Image: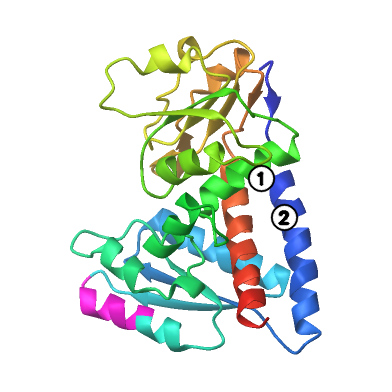
Amino acid sequence: MTAQLLEGTVVAEAVLKDVSRRVAALQDRGITPGLGTILVGDDGPSVSYVKKKHETCTAAGIASFHRTIERTASQADLCAAVDAFNDNDEIDGFLIQYPVPEGFDFNEAITRIDPAKDADGLHPVNLGKLVLQQEGPLPCTPAGIRAMLHHYDLDISGKDVVIVGRGPTLGRPLALILTLKQAFANAAVTVVHTGVPDIARHTKRADVVIAAAGIPGIVTPDMVKPGAIVISGGISWEGRRLIPDVDVAVGEVAGWITPRIGGVGPTTVAMLLFNTVQAAERRRR
């Protein structure tokens, strides 16, 4: 591999250092920030993600709360859990682990969350604030990708960025974030998806390629301009093995690339805790 690695673990450590400092300042005032998670079903990767989130909370001094909704439960049970977390004053922010099993309406449940407690930044009110460039929590994976660009001092202002994927948790909000007239954004962003017949026609000209489709190896070496920044935001699982959207061989062409393990994932968790402590600060101004 000739590309330099965009190590997400290093970025996450920097974000969490700031989070811990802010948590300590709140604790000096007698306040302990709280993060809640709601897991529907028993999907293996989702269980692991939630466990990691709570382990990171403990390390940062954030109280954690959890509720599991059985796969055989109803949408009303999920909504009741959301209402309970909304009413719990010890919880400053919470999320519903995505995806949820068939038969549950994720969008309805997200809309039921108090926007002030939306730790994932996916409530329609907060996505609307993003569109209007108003203060609010940002979706965690897109925010983690921007934090990565910032940490490695990769200025993308005015450059061509192609995002492969248009999902509501990553591709769409990331496009909005990277077009903002702000540092480490302000780019010319194109969003493509599996309905585009020739994705490579777009990615070959891009200074930055961000894969967010959840399709293993959708970005291959022949699709990337030499020296480009390539970030794998989407992942899939083959059994217990994590497979990124970017083929590992892209590292022989790209200038910068995320590793298979320890790329965007750690930054996503770090930004979740960042949103939680920020919510705690806002609630107690």
**Residue bearing mark 2:** 15
Q: Who is closer to the viewer here, 177 or 78?
A: 177
The structure residue drawn at horizontal position 37% and vertical position 48%, both measured from the top left corner, is: 168
Placement of the N terminus among the 4 image quadrants: top right
**Can residue 78 be seen at all in this image of the molecule?**
yes
Q: Are marks 2 and 1 in contact (CB under 8 Å)?
A: yes
Mark 1 highlights which residue? 147
Q: Is residue 229 above or below residue 152?
A: above
Residue 225 occupies which quadrant of the picture? top right
**29 or 272: nearer the viewer:** 29
Q: Quadrant of the C terminus?
A: bottom right
The part of the chain drawn in magenta is 72-82
Q: Position of residue 77 (x, y in %)?
A: 26, 80
- Residue 9 is covered by the magenta coloring: no
Residue 7 visible to an observer of this rendering: no
Q: Residues within 10 Å of mark 2 (few under 14, many from 20)?
A: many
